[in-house]
Amino acid sequence: MSFEEAATVFEGDESAYTDFDVDHSDDDPRFFTIGISQSGKFLFIVHNEEDDLIRIISARHATSRERSLYEESESF
């Protein structure tokens, strides 16, 4: 998984689900985003935001549970 592909989630998936990562935000506030990349892959991305810039910390394929969370968030 490239960071370039992960970045496409922020550029193109208007339904991407983002939430605060309570468990991993000790010194640095972190967020996670679940969304679909431009190539159609479901991704789970850990990132932080500073001065309107998103810094991707990690990216991987979303699990089935994470996909369900994404799909549930679309219904609201």
Image (spheres, grey):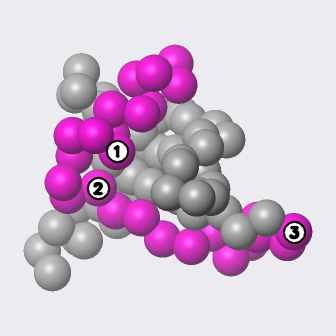
Q: What residue type is labelled 1?
A: Phe
Q: Give amino acid for label 2.
A: Ala
Residue at the location (28% across, 40% down)?
A: 11
Name the residue that disc number 3 marks. 27
Which residue appears at 22% of the width and 46% of the height? 13
Name the disc covering residue 10, or none.
Answer: 1
Q: Looking at this rendering, what residue extends furthest in the left direction?
A: 75
Tag 2's secondary structure? loop
Specify the amino acid type for callout 3: Asp
Asked whether the beta carbons under mark 2 and mark 1 sit within 8 Å of each other, the answer is yes
The picture places residue 12, in percent across and down from the top left corner, at 21, 40
Question: Would you identify the image quadrant in which residue 63 lies?
Answer: top left
Kindly report which numbered mark, 2 or 1, lies closer to the viewer in this rendering: 1
> Residue under circle 2?
16
What residue is shown at x 61% (from left), y 43% (from top)? Answer: 55
Evaluate whether residue 68 shows in this view: no
Q: Specify whether 37 is left or right of 2.
A: left
